[in-house]
C-alpha cells in the first residue's frame, strides 16, 4: 500500500528547515575558518606566506561559489592581512568563484527544476518552468516580461545585467543567497549569456580590490 503524500506546506517546510540547518552550519564553518586565518596571520618565511595565500585563495573560490555561504569574509580577511599584495589575487578569485556558481546553475537542466517544483507540490510554478524547455533565451525573456503587469519587473529584466551588478554589491545580499547564490540563480534562469555575465562580474567585483590598490593599504 502506497504511503500518503505529505501536504504541500509540510514538504516546503521540511525543505526550508533542511536548508536553514545547512546554511547555519556553513556559516559557522566559515566563521571558524576566518578566525583561524586571522589567528595564523603571521606565517614566517616567504614560502610559508605563499602557501598560506594559495590555500586561503583556493578555499575562498570554493566557498564564495556556494549559495548562502559568506565566503567573501575570507577574501576580506586576505585583503586586510596582505593588502595590495593580494588585491589582484582576491579579485580574480572572486570572479572565478562566481563563474563556477554561474556555470553550476547553467548545468542544471530545466527538467530538474520542474521535477523539484512538482515534488514540492508547486504545480503552477512547475508548469511555468516547463515552458523554459522549449524556448530560446530571448523567447523566455519575452515570456517573463509579458507575464508581469508591474513596470518595475520588466524594467529590471530588460536591464538585468545592471541589476545583477547592483545586486551582488547590495549590503545584506547574503540574505538572498550571497554572490554565489545570485550567480547560480543567474545561470539557472537562462537569462544571462556567459560572456556578458563574465563582463558584468569583472566590473561588479572590482571596486573593493581597486580601492585597496589605490589607497595602498
Image (cartoon, rainbow, N blue to C red):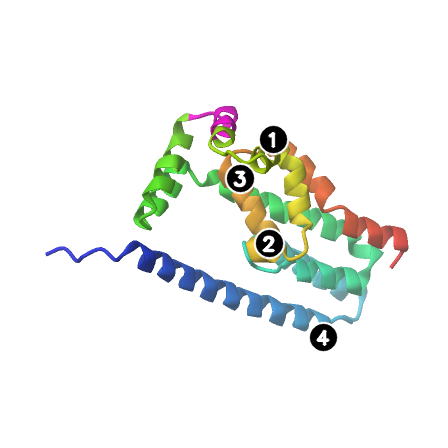
| In the rendered image, the vertical position of residue 191 relative to residue 77, given as above or below | above
Q: Quadrant of the C terminus?
A: bottom right
Magenta stretch: includes residue 140: yes
Q: Nearer the viewer, mark 1 or mark 3?
A: 1
Q: Are marks 1 and 2 in contact (CB under 8 Å)?
A: no
Q: Position of residue 125 (x, y in %)?
A: 38, 41
Q: Which numbered marker is on residue 13?
A: none
Residue at the disc numbered 4: 39
**Which residues fall within the magenta stretch?**
135-143
- Real-space Cα distance between discs 4 and 1? 46 Å
Would residue 179 appear left or right of 119 to someone viewing this image?
right
| In the rendered image, the vertical position of residue 176 relative to residue 105, given as above or below | below
Residue at the disc numbered 2: 178
In-front residue for pair 102/121: 121
- Real-space Cα distance between discs 1 and 2? 22 Å
Q: Nearer the viewer, mark 3 or mark 4?
A: 3
Q: Which numbered marker is on residue 187?
A: 3
| In the rendered image, the vertical position of residue 15 relative to residue 200, given as above or below | below
Residue at the disc numbered 1: 158
Helix, strand or loop for disc 4: helix
Q: Which is nearer the N-term, disc 1 or disc 3?
A: 1
Q: Position of residue 71 (x, y in %)?
A: 62, 59
Q: Which is nearer the N-term, disc 3 or disc 4?
A: 4
- Real-space Cα distance between discs 1 and 3? 16 Å
Amino acid at each position: 500500500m502506497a504511503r500518503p503524500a505529505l501536504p504541500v506546506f509540510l514538504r516546503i517546510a521540511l525543505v526550508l528547515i533542511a536548508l536553514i540547518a545547512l546554511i547555519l552550519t556553513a556559516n559557522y564553518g566559515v566563521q571558524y575558518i576566518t578566525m583561524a586565518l586571522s589567528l595564523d596571520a603571521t606565517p614566517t618565511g616567504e614560502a610559508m606566506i605563499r602557501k598560506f595565500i594559495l590555500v586561503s585563495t583556493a578555499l575562498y573560490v570554493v566557498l564564495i561559489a556556494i549559495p548562502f555561504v559568506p565566503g567573501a569574509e575570507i577574501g576580506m580577511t586576505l585583503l586586510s592581512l596582505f593588502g595590495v599584495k593580494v588585491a589582484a589575487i582576491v579579485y580574480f578569485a572572486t570572479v572565478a568563484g562566481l563563474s563556477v556558481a554561474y556555470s553550476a546553475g547553467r548545468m542544471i537542466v530545466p527538467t530538474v527544476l520542474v521535477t523539484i517544483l512538482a515534488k514540492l507540490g508547486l504545480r503552477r510554478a512547475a508548469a511555468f518552468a516547463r515552458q523554459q524547455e522549449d524556448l530560446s533565451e530571448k523567447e523566455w525573456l519575452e515570456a517573463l516580461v509579458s507575464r508581469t503587469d508591474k513596470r518595475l519587473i520588466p524594467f529590471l529584466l530588460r536591464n538585468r545585467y545592471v541589476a545583477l551588478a547592483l545586486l551582488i554589491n547590495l549590503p545584506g545580499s547574503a540574505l538572498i543567497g550571497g554572490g554565489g547564490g545570485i550567480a547560480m540563480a543567474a545561470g539557472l534562469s537562462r537569462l544571462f549569456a556567459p560572456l556578458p555575465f563574465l563582463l558584468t562580474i569583472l566590473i561588479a567585483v572590482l571596486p573593493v580590490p581597486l580601492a585597496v590598490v589605490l589607497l595602498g593599504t
